[in-house]
Image: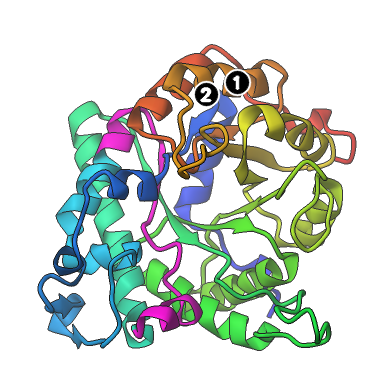
Amino acid sequence: MNSYSLPPTQTFAALEQAARERILILDGAMGTMIQTLNMTEEDFTANGHIHGPGCRHHQSDHPQKGNNDLLVLTQPQAVEDIQLKFALAGADILETNTFSSTTIAQADYGLEAAVHDLNVAGAQVARRAADRATAEDGKPRWVAGAVGPTNRTASISPDVNDPGYRAVTFDDLRLAYGQQIDGLIAGGADLILIETIFDTLNAKAAIFAAFESFAKIGQRLPIMISGTITDASGRTLSGQTPTAFWHSVRHARPFTVGLNCALGADAMRPHLSELAGVADTLVCAYPNAGLPNAFGQYDEEPEDTARKVEVFAREGLVNVVGGCCGTTPEHIRAIAGHVAGYAPRRIEETADA
């Protein structure tokens, strides 16, 4: 079956209408906010009581501190409260706390069996936060099911002595992403965000899996696709320029394509400009709050980040903006304020439309 022939969900029309009217706001860094809570191993495991929806109990003999995705099961109120803060700061789109909720990534924690519950609960928690914010201010919010890159790469060998070796196959990734996306849809995600893409082959597996999941429900959700330019070379880890990246994923007909992570807004701007010049869809950007200091912390103040992101809007490069590592609700509030007076990027002005 042609996946593009599936009818779109009602979310498509609502998002497209909102994106025509203004620059939309994505939320900020969940991980940064979780770090401020200084949670212990006991907090992460709820003292050993890891329960999914339906009272399914999950056990692991691995330490869980640092497994942020697990908190949607063990500390859901803490996650919801963070997402609510981002929503009330101005975020239109809230990401689920499911960046590493695949069997591949959760293998590090011995929680492969919990993946479906992590994604269902992740979407449900974000939905509750979105609904609470809407009840408070009347503004619509959408939940983006966050799909991270996993900790494996399909295009690059992890062994310098065996360049032909791959730690994961396309089908491994497709199946893992399919489980994740099925759970996100079951939990009520409005759209799917495939983000922090350092290897485009991984992203292609996620796209393939997304359309398999859409076929199961007979509807097509909007897809956001966000790559990561790793350094000043202007390329992803697997070697693609922004232009090449776009041509590798445009077949997915994404709602947005864009860039996130690795760079602050200043360093991201030329790569974003290149992408905006070729993409015939909406463009999304959510940079880090500058570069990390020697201790791995982000020092860029909200107003500084917001002024730099404002340049994206002033130059007509973006339709959606937000923040990645180091960005707090204060950063999102400042970004929303700085871009509010600018019109969203016009798709028909692209060079490759």
Amino acid type of the residue that numbered disc 1 sits on in the rendered structure: Lys
- Helix, strand or loop at disc 2? helix
Is residue 48 positioned above or below 290 on the image?
below
Q: Residues within 10 Å of mark 2 (few under 14, many from 20)?
A: many
Q: CA distance from mark 1 to mark 2?
A: 5 Å
Foreground pick, 201 / 59: 59
Tell whether label 2 touches label 1 (CB within 8 Å): yes
Is residue 215 positioned above or below 70 on the image?
below
Is residue 312 positioned above or below 87 on the image?
above
Q: Which residues are magenta?
A: 85-110
Residue for point 56% across, 85% down: 175
Does residue 196 appear to the left or right of 161 in the view shown?
left
Give coordinates of residue 257: x percent, y percent: 67, 47
Q: Across the whole image, how many numbered discs are drawn on residues?
A: 2
Residue for point 62% across, 48% down: 255
Amino acid type of the residue that numbered disc 2 sits on in the rendered structure: Thr
- Helix, strand or loop at disc 1? helix
Q: Which mark is residue 308?
A: 1
Does residue 158 appear to the left or right of 79 in the view shown?
right
Does residue 28 appear to the left or right of 260 in the view shown?
left
Question: Which quadrant of the view contains residue 88?
Answer: top left
Give coordinates of residue 126: x percent, y percent: 30, 53
